[in-house]
Amino acid sequence: MTRSPSLPPYVVAALLTVSIPAAAHAQSSTGSTGNRTAGAQPPVSSLTPADVKLLAETHIAIGLVHDSADARSAQSKNKTKDAQLELAQKKREAVAQVLTARGLTEDEYQRRRFVVSTNLELRTQFDSVVAKITGVPIPGRMAVAAAPGFVPAAQLPPGLVGTHIGHVTTSYVDTPEKMGLLPMAFAEAAVASQHAALATRTPTNLAAMQMHAGHVLNALDPSLMKEGPGKGYGLRKAAGGVAQHIELAAKETGASGGVKIHATHIAAAARGTLTRVDAAIALIKQIQSATDAKEASSLISQLASLCNQLANGADTNADGRVDWGNGEGGLQQAQEHVQLLIAGEKK
């Protein structure tokens, strides 16, 4: 069976956390579960691994249909009632084609969704298949320690030096889920890079490019674009916080020479990221003001390149390496020097 194309992480997460539970509710409310007691686990044997794999592939393919239809529906030329009705009909037909191509009826597809949604073992299998197909980690399954930039509290130096470093690497009071500022910066940079890349896939569709540019802006600075797939904190604020708090650590009386040296490197890399954030926002404003796709496409290409540099930095002097300073450093270089700092404090 042909694999379905990859979906963006936020789409997969939405499908997994909304679509399947909703289907389960719909099935139970219509009585299609027969005499089964609410909340009872269907037998695992009710679906084979091949059935679960087929369900996951179908689920992803239908998600792509919805994404494509929603993008067309959002275009200004399709805002009339007739256009919306026509698009809705085409979406239903496309979903039916997906099911037919996989040998499923609508009823059987919904039955399998219900079974998976109410059985933990099957749901785990389903999540694993989706993660394998899309390359996206299973929602809620990634350990915090695996997040880029994260350092466990037990590894931090003692006293106020460790407190400020912990704000950078481990936990901060006003971030979503109390993430450290550097892990938060990585998370927002990933969203920005992803949506800049998505924008490059539609070089003839001005509305789609402007939509994704807005998503990038939301990840960079949600005060400028409130709605979008970002984490709600913003890379600009997170990277600025990294520079501020690592420098506070270096200013503490108990800061070692290693802390002071690496704090300079970390802060410089964070500020290099901030410079790119400002440049990206300037590009986005031009994209949002563009009146034709050709003009926007050229700017989108620049934006995608710039967003890749948010985490990776850039070898601006062409010496074959990305330094923490000279405006080259990105979040990755900040992380490298965090690791060097922590390793030095263990000695």
Image (tube, rainbow, N blue to C red):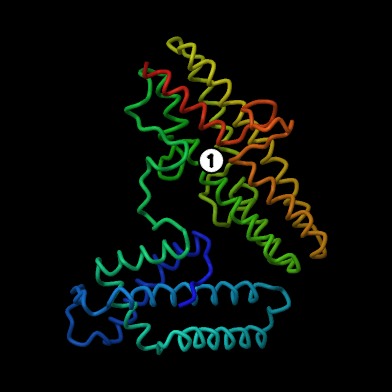
**Residue 190 falls left or right of residue 73:** left
**Residue 262 falls left or right of residue 37:** right
Residue nearest the viewer, comparing 142 with 286: 142
What is the total number of numbered labels drawn onto the structure image? 1
Residue 29 spot, x, y in % from top left? 29, 82
Residue 135 spot, x, y in % from top left? 47, 59
**Residue 142 falls left or right of residue 323:** left
Secondary structure under the numbered disc 1 in the rendered image = helix
Q: Residue at x 61, y 56 (%)?
A: 195
Tell me the kind of residue under disc 1: Ala
Residue corresponding to mark 1: 185
Q: Is residue 340 above or below residue 61?
A: above
Residue 109 spot, x, y in % from top left? 37, 83
**Residue 297 falls left or right of residue 4:** right
Q: Is residue 147 above or below residue 16?
A: above
Residue nearest the viewer, comparing 116 with 292: 116
Q: Residue at x 58, y 49 (%)?
A: 219
Residue 251 spot, x, y in % from top left? 51, 14
Residue nearest the viewer, comparing 103 with 138: 103
Q: Residue at x 61, y 87 (%)?
A: 85
